[in-house]
Amino acid sequence: MWRELLERGLSKSYALSWLFLALLVGAGIAIPGFFGDDGSVRTYRVATVGTESAGPGELAESIAPGVPGSYRIDLTTSPDSAGAAAAVADGTVDAALVGGNRVLVGKDTSSELESALRQAVLSYQVQSMVAAGEVSERAVAIMSGEGVEIVTAEPEVDTAAEDRQFLISQVALVLLFMAVMTTGSWVLLGVTEEKTNRVSEVLLSSLRPWQLLAGKIIGVGLLGLLQFGSIATGLIVAVRLVLDVTLPEVDAGFLAISLIWFVLGYLVYATGYAAVGAIAHRPEDAQNAAFPMMVVTVAGYLIGILYVSGNPDTVWSTVLTLIPVTAPFVLPVRAVSDSVAAWEQVAAFMLMTGFIILLIRAAGRVYAGGVFNYRTRIKARQAYRSAEF
């Protein structure tokens, strides 16, 4: 494992792939920011309740810049505060003005709109006092911000939470698919290269084949986790700070399930790619030999994202949860909609763990039987039977 971390972690290909991903993420953030304010005007919908809120609403509408790159406010009326709160909670309007001093905001209300409405309410109160000739010490309290109350409208049932979690589960599937394809190819080529330059002969003189294979898989997995983790962390920080986007909250239990099955899915597919690399006789033929593994990977991904995401409660979804090659793509999708029972999670985990142990043992034997074949590609069954270790 340590050798894999040093050899591949310090290689030019690893550094270039890291740089490429970083540049790709950076471009995805910088380009929209560079072309973002292209003359568009953001429109905020604000509801007013009662005659007392009409004045502050009209003032907020009038002082909105409305120029390219800024915002404007569209007013609408609501019959009562309960209806306004519901409209804010479900996103029908961006905010609401209730009475003469209350601003209802939602979780997704921008700080720009909240600040504008706060300023409009305070300014309207001061203007009303001046017009009535009742300027007193209360004006000081109003100007210090005590004349306005900001209230967050909470929906009775957060229907958007499930949609956010579903989106996160889709992102998790995409990341798993990318990680398997990327790190799987590293394992595949690494095994084939060691076989070609006969480094494996030296390593196998002091290690069992399955130990060598497990160390390679863990080492490559750690490198992939480091790469994807650093890029994801940088992306989250950049999106939060540069684009000022509020990221959705993630349930801790769902996050734990996604991480566990992310690791288990990588172990299964990386082990398969390692066995395939052992039966290929040169790096040029490794991709052709790995085609069946790629088909299984793509099939598992498509099953999870196309079928199970829309049918999490069917019998077939339950069956696919218990199959090791499809479970990593299926179980997180079902977990996000609370469609997977506790016994299914335990059973799937036990089956997956046992399958990984057996697969590493079997792949190690295939590795031992195929790693010394330098002339032509052999079948996995032949490599398994001809193993001497």
Image (tube, rainbow, N blue to C red):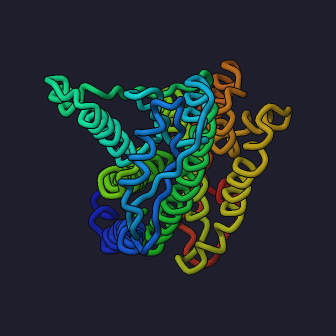
365 over 65 or under it: above or below? above
Quarter residue 231 falls in? bottom left
Residue 57 in view (yes/no): yes
- Farthest right residue? 315
Number of callouts in the render?
0
Please say if 134 is above or below 380: above
Side (left or right) of 57 relative to 358: left
Give residue 382's position: percent from left, percent from top: 70, 60
**Would residue 205 be visible to someone looking at this image?**
no
Report whether 215 appears left or right of 366. left
Q: Is residue 237 above or below residue 311?
A: below
In the image shown, does 299 or 109 lie closer to the viewer? Answer: 109
Toward the viewer: 258 or 211? 258
Q: Farthest residue in the top direction?
A: 343
Q: Residue visible at 50% across and 56% down?
A: 43
Q: Position of residue 23 (x, y in %)?
A: 35, 71
The residue closer to the viewer here, 244 or 91, is: 91
Residue occupying the far front of the picture? 133
Q: Residue at x 69, y 19 (%)?
A: 343
Residue shown at the point (59%, 38%) measured from the top left: 77
Examine the image and state in which quarter residue 63 appears.
bottom left
| Residue 213 locus on image (x, y percent) | 48, 51
Residue lying at 47% horizontally and 59% vertically, measured from the top left = 42
Closer to us: 100 or 320: 100
